[in-house]
Image (tube, rainbow, N blue to C red):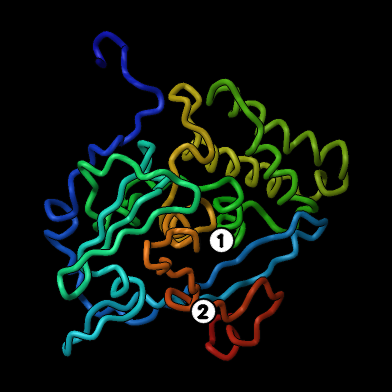
Amino acid sequence: MVLVDHYPRPIMADHKVPVASTTCLNCHNPHAEMGDKLLVTQSFASDATNSPTSSVTVLHVGGEDSLGHLSGIHGAHSGKIEYVSTDNTDQNIPWVRKTNADGSTTEFIASGASVPNIGHPRVMDCIGCHNRAAHSFDTAEGALDKMMAQGSPNTSLPFLHKEGLALLNTKYDSQGEAKARITSGLITFYRSQYPAVWDTQRTQVETSANTLLKIYLNNVFPAMNLRWGTHPNNIGHNDSAGCFRCHDGSHTSKAGKTITNDCSICHNLVVSNELHPKLLTDLGMR
């Protein structure tokens, strides 16, 4: 396919990824008790000062303790769970079957969905959620927020988040075009709209432009038809459907039992987009 230049663009896994038992589980123990994990994220507004806010989430990763008690995200998905998806990226899952502790099974069907062909259901394993173990493509805003939190692009530049996001989300025909237009676009913005900033912070503007370009080149490959969002991320539910593929409150059994969509089983949102969270100060993290 490479020799004759005839291969799919983009290249998708299409259910060809080896099962976790032959890959992940050679090193990772899926039953290990992981407890809780503190996740701190920072985001920036598209205003003149790029106002920063922080969020703190307690993720109940859980697992199985020494007494066999199951808890958290891993514990809730232990055992045999099968599913059928109607697309090659497992984003639409109308049917789920769970094998209960006594050996019986419960089938769940999404509201309004017809029963699919369940001749060869997939068994849920690590890859069902951890589908981005290698090159984890980001969203434009997610990548920009992460880099701004690290210091570049520079938050002292007015409207940097707004302009940077607009440049990243522009559709370019090639990476070569992106290299020219992203760099020149940010420089032109400050030279024309904020000449004083350009005169006094030229180095910061140029460095920020280079960082924007790096973000784009690491995530978008026009020649492969690979753009923002081409590859879904099934961890969480912010960037893609993820958890909500099944935990959407609409997958119901014949007996009326529904796959839970109780958020607290998986996480607790302790702080949501606060300017200076006291919690982070108390933890010595600011």
The residue located at (50%, 25%) in the rendering is 222
Which one is closest to the eye, mark 1 or mark 2?
Answer: 2
Task: Decide: is 244 above or below 85.
Answer: below
Q: Is residue 204 left or right of residue 210?
A: right
Cβ atoms under marks 1 and 2 closer than 8 Å: no
Going by the numbered disc 2, the residue's amino acid type is Asn
Which residue bears the numbered disc 2?
268
Residue 244 pos. (x, y %): 47, 58
Q: Quadrant of residue 252?
A: bottom left
Q: Residues within 10 Å of mark 1 (few under 14, many from 20)?
A: few
Q: Is residue 228 left or right of residue 166?
A: left
Q: Residues within 10 Å of mark 2 (few under 14, many from 20)?
A: some
Comparing 251 with 210, the one in front is 251
Residue 234 pos. (x, y %): 41, 53
The residue located at (49%, 53%) in the rendering is 111
Which residue bears the numbered disc 1?
150
